[in-house]
Image: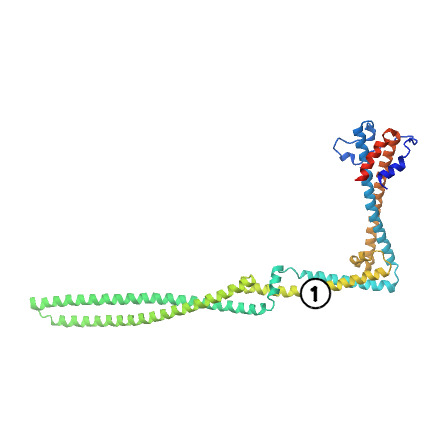
Amino acid sequence: MKIKEWFQSKFINPFRKVQDEEEVFVDPEDEIREENGPLRRASLDIRDKEQRDRYISNCCEQMIEATEEVEKASMEYRLVTEYLKDMEAIDNLPPDIRNPINLTAERIINLDRQSRANEKSLGKITESQYMLMSRYEHDVPEDIEKIQQNEEYRELVRSDMQKLESEKAVSSFRARELRLTIRNMRNMVGITLAFGFLLIFLLCILQFVMELDATVGFFVTAAVAAAAFTAEYLSYSSASVQLRNTEHYLNAVIAKQNTVKVRYVNTTNLLEYEYRKYHINVSNELVYYWDNYLEEKKAREALERNDSELAEEKKTLINRLRRAQIHDPSVWVNQCEALINPKEMVEVRHDLIVRRQSLRKRIEYNTENRNQSKDEVNSIVHDYPEYGQEILEIVSKFDQK
């Protein structure tokens, strides 16, 4: 009933007998109202329009709020009561009806456990990685093998490049040594010639100027010079041949190194393309993604099947409970454990009873507040009938909200 209708039914005769004792009303929420300060009936100046209007407005607000709380609590109270009645009805079902319900509840519990187990297998890779594996599902196994082979081949090529680089360094060093030897032999020939001519010149002085017999000196000088030239020539020739061979080998190493570099670059480019394709850095990452993709795919398929079966079993349970005249069968879809476990049913019942008691107290408390507010307005109208019409207008404003 609206506040205005109630007010008119109560106060249609503003000259009803005044109550023997004036009731003092205290707004429970006045303590938290800071605007203009709290108003209490004991300190209310009823002839002050501002105080009177604010006081009546507070009473109306309390009636509206209390009524809304009573309606909410009453609705929930009815639901809890129906729930308790359903529990009693389920407990009293005959075995031929209860047993199929319990079997369905057990299947729901098992399917729910399987779904949770499958969900644990999810999330090891991101959704984007899963979609990427799904997109190239038919290519991944072959690409894994190809990438691994190319990685192994690249390592072999890199090893060959390192060996060739070492051989190139050794050959280059050997060529520099041989060139130095050849240059030294050339210098030695010059030195030998110089010393030979110097000795011959000295021997000529001894022979022709000083008229000494230098024949032996000429022979010794010729023999030593011949031996020196022979040794230098042999060393020079050997170094030249070795240098020629070393340079040929060095050129072969460089040519092979260039070929190997081309292979390395081509293999690296191919690998980088595959890496970009799958957003990886090495083949092991792709193997990890692929293995987890297969596991997650299997888990998702199982989860989808379980969800489908679970939905069917829940429908079956609801239909069985509905045929058993249960008021709200859908509630029991999430309370299957209570259907098959008496201890769980007792705990649920106890919780509902406690909730209902709390709701009852809530209803009683707000009903009392609402009645106190009504009685307070009634008291003011009967004590001060000259303000009855004004109070009715205030009540009408709250009815329009």
Q: Nearer the viewer, residue 202 or 29?
A: 29
User: What residue sits 81% from the left and 61% below the top?
Assistant: 317
Looking at the figure, which quarter contains the C terminus?
top right
Between 47 and 286, the one nearer to me in the picture: 47
SS class of the residue under badge 1? helix
Residue 182 place in picture, x, y as percent: 27, 67
- In the figure, residue 209 lies in which quadrant? bottom left
x, y (%) of residue 74?
84, 47
Spot occupied by residue 368 in the image (x, y as percentages of width and height): 85, 39
The answer to which image quadrant residue 110 occupies is bottom right
Classify 339 as above or below 369.
Answer: below
State the residue in front, 192 or 154: 154
User: Going by the image, does 365 lie left or right of 188?
Assistant: right
Circle 1 is placed at which residue position?
302
| Residue nearer the viewer, 394 or 273 | 394
* Picture quarter with the N terminus: top right
Q: Is residue 378 left or right of residue 313?
A: right
The mark tally for this picture is 1
